Image (cartoon, rainbow, N blue to C red):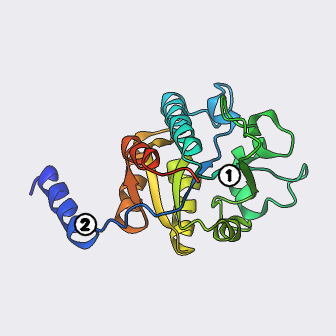
Amino acid sequence: MSAPEHDDDLLANYQRAYNTRVGFGARPALLLIDFCQGYFTPDCDLYGGEPIETALQSALRVREAARKAGVPVILTNVVYHPQAIDGGRFFEKAAPLRYFLQGHPMGAFGPGLEPHADELVVSKQYPSAFFGTSLASTLTAMGVDSVLLTGLTTSGCVRASCVDAMSHGFRTAVIAEACGDRHSAPHEANLFDMNAKYADVVSEAEATAFLNGLTKP
């Protein structure tokens, strides 16, 4: 059997087992995950180049649609104590996390993503936006039933947040163009897996059309 035939068989197997769409919820929130300056700075270890810039521009367009629809917008960042005493094993394992020590310029929000006064910022120390934060409780108190995910990186904090969003009972959609990674392989593989098991992976056009169809409260 040739490799392409094997790949086709594997894809068909996945589609038989995992081919369910849950759809958008009635009261969504938009999450913009870890769009930090380091990913856009060429001399930083985190620099991701064109895929990261493309993801940010997509996320900014979705954010504009969400704001027009009155959908809550939540930005996340990673912030550690200056001595990293709250970094745990994640900080020990991932060397670039040193850029997220409190006050480091690489940990600031990326270009064009400064939070508006009515947008919530959730600071975290681990990959998921939900782990060790009040995000799930806050969304529940807001009456939110679903989340739209954008951010960096697809294989890291987006994926971790996706799994936890679903686990907390939120309908979860991942906006493909508004997520980025430094290489297409982990980006595509993780989109494929999230779509199979945890979320609906949707296009920017789908997400924007959905948001445009909402009535602002």
Q: The N terminus lies in which quarter of the figure?
A: bottom left
Please provide percent x and percent y for residue 203.
Answer: 37, 45
Residue found at the very far top of the displayed protein: 42
> What secondary structure is found at the residue carrying circle 2?
helix
- Name the residue tied to disc 1: 94
Q: Is residue 104 above or below residue 27?
A: above
The residue drawn where x is 38% and y is 68% is 197
Compute the Cα span from label 2 to label 1: 32 Å
Q: Which mark is residue 14?
A: 2
The residue drawn where x is 77% and y is 45% is 100
- Label 2 or label 1, whichever lies nearer to me, is 2
- Residue type at mark 1: give it: Ala
Residue found at the very far right of the displayed protein: 83
Q: Is residue 32 left or right of residue 4?
A: right
Earlier-in-chain disc, 2 versus 1: 2
The residue drawn where x is 43% and y is 67% is 198
Residue found at the very far left of the displayed protein: 1
- Residue type at mark 2: give it: Tyr
Please provide percent x and percent y for residue 10.
Answer: 21, 62
Contact flag, marks 2 and 1 (Cβ < 8 Å): no
The residue drawn where x is 55% and y is 45% is 66
Q: Is residue 95 left or right of residue 213?
A: right
Crowd class of label 2 (few under 14; some 14 to 19; many from 20; radius 10 Å) = some
Q: Is residue 9 left or right of residue 45?
A: left
Q: Nearer the viewer, residue 85 or 168?
A: 168
Q: Nearer the viewer, residue 217 or 107?
A: 217
